Image: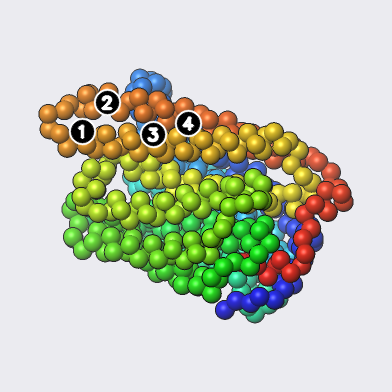
């Protein structure tokens, strides 16, 4: 299952890193551009929630379209590009050989980002579906499926061509994410777009897809990075590592069943949300295993470890809140309110914080240069931590007030909106802070692309070979 001997992957900056420099740099810069674009759209969207007249005369930026565009930009643009870049680098490193098939990767990345761009444009002009997190036009989605296959091909080659028979948890999660996404993405396309099921089955499939997008794709990509970064930076073997396999399979088996919690009280068989509630509790076993493996995550390690730590805590909190608020006594208040937006932002924050840490770790190694501005690094870190904390808390409070008021028949919608409006103003400020922080990261990354590789710089990244044993 695992091993404690040295991997054949070379530490520090090596051919493994430099061979994929251009391809991975393209994915990362594309992800950051989409992150900033999504941040702008998310800010506009929040402004409209408390100021409905804002951009009311512009048909391209109505509230519904803005919401769909920012979801598309952040999930498929930011998370898709960043997650694939990190996963391929990890699989290449732990496989012990340079990344193969980079031509497929570049071609796939180009078509993937063209697809996301066409999807955002299509949504802006009203050519969109009605399914959450899958609102791009139906003619774009087959293109993205093919593009994803091209991007994932180097990861499959790194997995099948690895030099060691033994594997690490990082590889399990990364390769699972690469394989599972095309499965549920293609299944959802067929059942919702090209041979659509009828009636309430559409809601069941839609929530199943939306949940899988996080549980079986974004979360495994983030956890894969965690299992590499934490022991690597701490320089210690991960505690209770033999239990990692149980955490992996509990997420893969039970995570796909939790989407029905969004259908509590809806016109679906009662067993669907009940199964989702049970699955949500069982997924907590996965969170417990990851917590045992990550014990002692705090300490030294600079901004990479700090981002990984807060991303990990956000991930744990997201799992607990998802399970707790699947209970009907809570769902009667939070269902169809801004509280669900807070839950989504918490899930996105957990992924983003870990990905930021991974980017700060791998970019100097593929570029052979240190980050040009430590001030921009600190600024991005502070803006991100503070921005996500304030955004999630304010949306959570607004959603709880909204849900409580909606259950009071004596309150008008106008009075309800006035009650939680101050929290939306706070959330808008937090979203603006996040946007500033993400711009700092983008500027810093563009600057590092123009820094020449230095032997003195690459020496800072070298580590003893025996640390590769704990890099899973």
| Mark 4 and mark 3 residues within 8 Å of each other at the beta carbon | yes
| Mark 4 and mark 1 residues within 8 Å of each other at the beta carbon | no
Q: How far apart are marks 3 and 1 (CA)?
A: 16 Å
| Mark 2 and mark 1 residues within 8 Å of each other at the beta carbon | yes
Q: Which of 58 and 343 is in front in this view?
A: 343
The quarter of the displayed image where residue 393 is located: top left
Secondary structure of the residue carrying numbered label 2: helix
Q: How far apart are marks 4 and 2 (CA)?
A: 19 Å
Residue 419 is tagged as 2
Q: Distance between the residues labelled 2 and 3?
A: 13 Å
Instruction: Tell me residue 285's x, y (percent).
Output: 40, 66
The quarter of the displayed image where residue 33 is located: top right
Residue highlighted by disc 3: 394
- Against 438, residue 260 (above or below) is below
Q: Distance between the residues labelled 4 and 3?
A: 9 Å
Residue 115 is at least partly visible in this image? no
Q: Nearer the N terminus, badge 4 or badge 3?
A: 3
């Amino acid at each position: 299952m695992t091993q404690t001997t040295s991997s054949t992957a070379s530490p520090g900056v090596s051919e493994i890193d430099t061979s994929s420099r251009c391809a991975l740099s393209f994915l990362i810069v594309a992800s950051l551009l989409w992150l900033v674009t999504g941040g702008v759209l998310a800010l506009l969207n929040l402004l409209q929630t408390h100021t409905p007249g804002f951009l009311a005369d512009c048909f391209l930026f109505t509230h519904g379209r803005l919401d769909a565009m920012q979801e598309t930009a952040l999930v498929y643009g930011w998370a898709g590009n960043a997650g694939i870049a990190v996963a391929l680098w990890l699989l290449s490193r732990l496989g012990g050989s340079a990344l193969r098939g980079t031509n497929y990767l570049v071609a796939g990345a180009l078509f993937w980002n063209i697809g996301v761009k066409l999807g955002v444009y299509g949504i802006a002009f009203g050519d969109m579906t009605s399914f959450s997190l899958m609102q791009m036009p139906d003619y774009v989605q087959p293109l993205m499926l093919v593009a994803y296959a091209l991007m994932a091909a180097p990861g499959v080659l790194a997995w099948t061509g690895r030099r060691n028979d033994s594997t690490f948890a990082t590889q399990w999660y990364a390769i699972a994410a690469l394989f599972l996404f095309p499965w549920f993405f293609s299944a959802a396309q067929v059942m919702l777009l090209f041979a659509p099921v009828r009636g309430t089955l559409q809601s069941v499939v839609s929530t199943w897809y939306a949940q899988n997008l996080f549980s079986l794709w974004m979360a495994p990509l983030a956890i894969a990075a965690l299992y590499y970064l934490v022991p690597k930076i701490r320089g210690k073997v991960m505690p209770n590592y033999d239990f990692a396999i149980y955490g992996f399979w509990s997420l893969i088996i039970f995570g796909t069943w939790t989407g029905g919690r969004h259908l509590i009280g809806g016109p679906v068989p009662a067993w669907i949300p009940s199964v989702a509630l049970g699955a949500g509790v069982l997924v907590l076993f996965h969170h417990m295993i990851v917590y045992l493996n990550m014990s002692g995550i705090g300490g030294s390690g600079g901004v990479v470890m700090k981002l990984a730590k807060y991303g990990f805590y956000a991930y744990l909190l997201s799992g607990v809140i998802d399970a707790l608020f699947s209970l009907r006594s809570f769902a009667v208040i939070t269902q169809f309110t801004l509280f669900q937006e807070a839950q989504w932002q918490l899930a996105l924050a957990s992924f983003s914080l870990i990905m930021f840490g991974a980017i700060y770790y791998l970019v100097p190694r593929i570029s052979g240069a240190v980050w040009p501005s430590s001030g921009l690094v600190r600024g991005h870190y502070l803006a991100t931590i503070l921005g996500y904390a304030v955004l999630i808390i304010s949306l959570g409070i607004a959603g709880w007030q909204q849900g409580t008021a909606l259950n009071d028949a004596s309150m008008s919608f106008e009075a309800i909106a006035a009650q939680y409006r101050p929290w939306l103003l706070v959330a808008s400020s937090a979203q603006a802070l996040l946007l500033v922080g993400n711009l700092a990261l983008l500027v810093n990354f563009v600057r590092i692309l123009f820094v020449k590789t230095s032997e003195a710089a690459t020496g800072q990244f070298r580590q003893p070979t025996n640390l590769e044993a704990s890099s899973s």
